Image (tube, grey):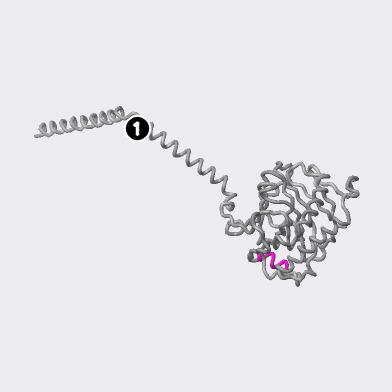
Amino acid sequence: MPREQSRKDGESKIRSRKKTAKSSENTKDVSKENPNKASTFKLQLKIFCFNCVICLAVSIYLYPYYFYLRERHLAKQTEHIDVRSGDVPCSEKYKAEIQAFPGCVPVRCGRMVSDKLVTPEEVDHVLEIGKRGLNLGGSDGGASILDLHSGALSHGKSFVNIYKIDEAKDLFTASDFKIYKQVRSKIQSAIAEHFGIDEKVLHLTHPTFFSRLTSDPPSTPHDEYWHPHVDKETYESFHYTSLLYLNTFGEDYTGGRFLFIDPDNHTQIVEPKKGRVSMFTSGWENVHLVERVASGTRYALTISFTCDLSHAIKDPS
């Protein structure tokens, strides 16, 4: 019996080895019969990984511009708008700060657009004033400004005082300053009416300036006007901001739209149009940017107002 059992065990081991060997041969045969399967799988895996990397890179690049995909227009260039507004909740910081100025607290915060405040003749005259001054200077980058109040004029990578330039001695006339004041007064009245404040406690403040934007690359950080910002953070004196557009998006330039960036990552867009006035509360409820100009030249006049008498300035003369 022991010998018989030993013989059976030996036969069992031999059979097991044969099965293992046969299985190995079958595996080798399968590999030999399908030599392209492994390489095809590797190629598909590489393509899949490459596509994943591309998608990730595109997502990272486009994320800062996500809000562009969720656009709403407050004013299109093709429209003629008597008055159109969009209310937004006042930021807590803005509300707390402006409470110190009775009569200047808005009944609402938000933004408003009108194409009827300034006449075509007035806007033509204002544009001509701005061009006349800006032509005596100009930034090395794509953003140039002229402040008629302080005389600040972009020049290369810095600023000069336009009133100290010999060629500017008789550059501006009494008629120029009269039109400038007339336009400022109309906008000031419209702000007071729309936001429900006392016009007597609303004062012109600095900086108030012409801007000329082109597609030229920036030469200093000041030329990078397309970053989101809050006017109250940039200019402490601001409580209400207004812009008079002096030429037209889509005709005189491309890019250069004005974008309000709302908390839900939507943007509310104002497309500039010659003679159009945009006005808004200057607090954190109105984060905004100007789209980078892609071609042409964009002209505008920023007129700012404060409730703080200590920051008030007079009209240029």
Q: Considering the numbered disc 1 on the image, is that residue within a helix, a strand or a loop?
A: helix
Determine crowd level at label 1: few under 14, some 14-19, many 20+ residues with C-alpha closer than 10 A: few
Vertically, is 11 above or below 161? above
Task: Give percent across and percent down for residue 99.
Answer: 72, 70
- At which x and y percent is residue 233? 72, 58
User: Which of the pair 134/224 is nearer the observer?
Assistant: 134
Residue, disc 1: 37
Image position of 176 with respect to 202: above or below:
above
State which quarter of the image contains the N terminus.
top left
Residue that sits furthest to the front in the current view: 121
164 and 243: which one is in front?
Answer: 243
**What percent of the width, then of the height, locates residue 196?**
71, 70
Q: Quadrant of the C terminus?
A: bottom right
Q: Amino acid at mark 1?
A: Lys
- Above or below, 126 against 88 in this view is above
Q: Which residues are magenta?
A: 90-98
| Extreme-top residue of the structure | 32
The residue shown at (31%, 30%) is: 34
Q: Residue at x 44, y 36 (%)?
A: 46
Task: Answer with the quarter of the image where residue 116 lies.
Answer: bottom right
**Along the horizontal axis of the image, is 142 left or right of 31?**
right
Q: Residue at x 70, y 63 (%)?
A: 281
